[in-house]
Image (cartoon, helix red, strand yellow):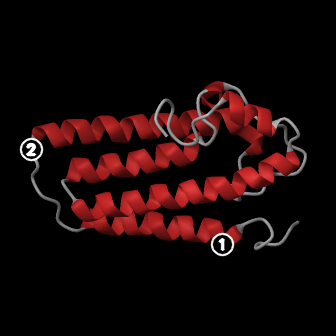
Amino acid sequence: MHGFTARGGWWVVGQFCLFGAVLAALVTSGEDWGAWARVLGAAVAAAGAVQAAWGLAALGESLTPFPAPRPGTAMVERGVYRLVRHPIYGGLGIGAAGLGLFDGNPLALWAAAALVLYLWAKSGHEERRLVSHFPDYAAYRTRVPRRLVPWLL
């Protein structure tokens, strides 16, 4: 399973297109929703960045943008993976939403929502691969019920 398509490369392309949509929306003029939106948006964006960074650190050598797990890697259950199964995806999604809120930008919020929905679908596709690759993944999924955001989603 070495080919781009076999590893789930088109999922990665779609994800980067949606990142681009969020960034494109952010360069358009936002509105002034007040200090509350900037403070809340900054806090949400920071929480997303922390969650994604924590996930990146915990994955280490197992990190890949593709839904197919890297051959020869072990299943990761440490760090933030004790709380949520796809923390990087969740962190990117809530980080994008936080930036849209900070900027007072409805278009960026819509693009962030589309990104979250896409990452939800990508994580579902990835989980089917993880269940076949790691015999303990089904039990892990039961122990860690949240897919993207601890205690929420």
Q: Quadrant of residue 53?
A: top right
- Callout 1 environment at 10 Å: few (<14), some (14 to 19), or many (20+)? some
Using the image as rendered, state which of residue 124 and residue 109 is in the foreground: 124
Q: CA distance from mark 2 to mark 1?
A: 39 Å
Looking at the rendered structure, which numbered label has been put on residue 10? 1
Q: Quadrant of residue 9?
A: bottom right
When the figure is inspected, residue 50 is found, relative to residue 114, above or below; the finding is above
Q: Is 36 or 127 nearer to us in this picture?
A: 127
Where does residue 130 sit, x and y in percent of width and height?
79, 48
Residue 59 position by quadrant: top right
Identify the residue shown where x is 30% and y is 57%: 109
Is 72 located above or below residue 25 in the figure? above
Residue assigned mark 2: 34
Tell me which amino acid carries mark 1. Answer: Trp
Visible residue check, residue 65: no
Answer whether labels 2 and 1 touch (C-beta < 8 Å): no
Secondary structure state at the residue bearing disc 2: loop
Residue at point 61%, 43% (across, down):
86
> Outermost residue toward the front?
142
